[in-house]
Image (cartoon, rainbow, N blue to C red):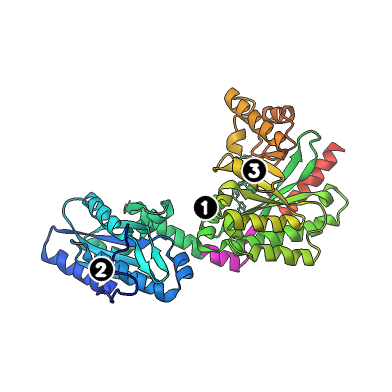
Amino acid sequence: MHARNDTARSCGRPSLCSPAALLGLARASLERESGSALAILAVAPDGFSRLRDSIGYERAARLLDCIAERLLQCAPQLAIARVGEHEFVLLVPLRERVHDLDALWHELRALLALPYGVETGEVCLQFCAGVARIGLEELAAGDGLDAAGAALHHAQKTGPGQYSVFRAGILREARARVELEHELRLALARRELQVHFQPVMHTRSAKLRGAEALVRWKHASLGWVPPARFVPVAEECGLIHELGEFVLGQVLAWRARWRTRTDTLARAEISFNVSARQLDDDRFVEALERARAQGLLEGPPLWMELTETALVADGPAARARLLRIRGMGLRLALDDLGMGYSSLLQLRDLPFDALKIDRMLTAGVGTEPLETRLFGAICALARSIPLCVVAEGIETHAQLEVLRREGVACAQGYLWSPALPAADFQHWNEQRARSSA
Ligand code: C2E
Ligand code: MG
Ligand code: MG
């Protein structure tokens, strides 16, 4: 394929209109022809920020002009506007159904996928798109652009080159997410998040090995918000760095306190969870280095848990940071084994000390023959590497029996305790020690 002759150098400034003018045109058109329908197609190149970092702002700006030029060539649009840094919105007449736009999108996508000439060579881009039908009602509600934008962002979350048709739920979800992001920002600033600790037990001796730190958020009106809901939001908007440093700060503070005690808490091995996004740059490693300089990493082993899906994102750089972290004496656990992908390669390539088996894989252990055999096979795999195994979600004695039989060293679950506020965890441990004395 050859670059079209619209190199980023030769493109003139294409004539786009403003988003307000596009909406004005839409209103005029809908009022003129009652019963007519329009759609807004929002289009954006994938990974543009990264490309801009590599080719520079000026070339990136000219590249966007070329994209606009190609969009303007496409036949049926009534107007095109640029929104935000690198999103375009096209106003298109809708003949019958939104699905008519599938064909238009395929045509557009092929045109946009042709190489672009930049001074340093050629670049190929992939695009995501979102489409929404608009009528006078949506325009009156101010939803015209938001709906298409929400469909675009939904497509982008699905993956590169995706296309998504707006449904009412998308905008609702997008707004709820923005709201949650705002609330989370406030909660972090007001230090409303907490860290709870779930005991991790030695299966043979039934003694405490340590605890997993799990972040908790009690919102004034929403109540307890599960981490599965707000951690992905924090990852998406970058708040995960603050959240992670908060959790690390709490873990280190409690650990330092517990080290001065005379009971099993003094030797407790504490683990905390880290998202892939926290390994995107050096911030987290630097926070750990500061902690080391203050002597806060000394004492019983400190564990860092990573989900396998977290690791696939950024292979070599993540690996280098993990090695630095391990060099500081931390131990690494692969969390949620079996819930992501390429886990076996990660076991080969990354320096893990332990494997945590997700509760989805321990739920039927001891009662469901197939699940029990599958669990046994995973344990055999871990033994062959060899890695310490921690089984999660243990709720019954039947499960515990199988763990002991399979030589699984550690476990956590409601059989012992859910995650508790630090003071309650301390109390729980004291009571256990008293009752087993
Ligand atoms: P995870 O690290 O695999 O944590 C284990 C989850 O299983 C926790 O859910 C825990 O409360 C739950 N659990 C433990 N034992 C049992 C049991 O016996 N039965 C049942 N039904 N559930 C049990 P939680 O606290 O909702 O956390 C969900 C996930 O959120 C965590 O999965 C972890 O991936 C993430 N997460 C939690 N805290 C943090 C954090 O500080 N940072 C990051 N990046 N992620 C976190
Ligand atoms: Mg975990
Ligand atoms: Mg887990």
Amino acid on which disc 2 is placed: Ile
x%, y% of residue 187?
57, 64
**Label annotation for residue 270:** none
User: In the displayed structure, does residue 15 sit left or right of residue 434?
Assistant: left
**Label annotation for residue 347:** 3
Measured along the vertical axis of the image, is residue 143 above or below residue 380? below
Amino acid on which disc 3 is placed: Leu
x%, y% of residue 1?
32, 57
Q: Which stretch did the figure color magenta?
A: 183-194
Q: Quadrant of the C terminus?
A: top right
Amino acid on which disc 1 is placed: Arg
Residue 398 appears in which quarter of the rendering?
A: top right
Judging by the rendered image, the residue that carries numbered circle 1 is 229
User: In the displayed structure, does residue 96 sit left or right of residue 266?
Assistant: left
x%, y% of residue 200?
73, 43
Helix, strand or loop status at disc 2: strand
Q: Nearer the viewer, mark 3 or mark 2?
A: 3
Helix, strand or loop status at disc 1: helix
Q: CA distance from mark 1 to mark 3?
A: 28 Å
Q: Is mark 1 within 8 Å of ligand 1?
A: no
Residue located 69% across and 40% down the image: 412
Q: Is residue 113 magenta?
A: no
